[in-house]
Amino acid sequence: MILFRRKYPRWWFDFSMALFKFATRVGAYLFLLRDEYPSGL
């Protein structure tokens, strides 16, 4: 679409930012998902 219209549509930018934010949150959740609690046992 960028090649034909030579501009980046706003809805495409918004969608890609929302997808990036969602993927970042899921990745952080999975990265921090550890079974350390309770640590005293």
Image (tube, rainbow, N blue to C red):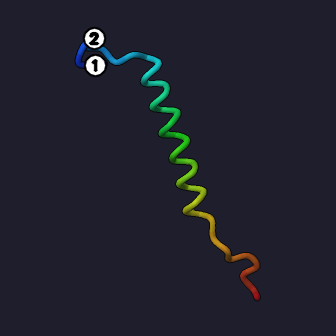
For the residue pair 22 and 4, the one nearer the viewer reads as 4
**Mark 2, residues whose alpha carbon is within 10 Å: few (<14), some, or many (≥20)?**
few
Name the image quarter holding the C terminus: bottom right
**Residue flagged by tag 1: what amino acid is it?**
Ile
Q: Residue at x 49, y 27 (%)?
A: 15
Name the image quarter holding the N terminus: top left
The residue most toward the bottom is 41
- Which residue position holds label 2? 5
Rendered location of residue 25, percent (x, y): 57, 48
- Which residue position holds label 1? 2
For the residue pair 32 and 19, the one nearer the viewer reads as 19
Rendered location of residue 8, percent (x, y): 34, 18
Rendered location of residue 3, percent (x, y): 23, 18
Compared with 12, 6 (above or below) is above
Q: Residue at x 57, y 51 (%)?
A: 26
Q: Is residue 2 left or right of residue 21?
A: left
Compared with 18, 2 (above or below) is above
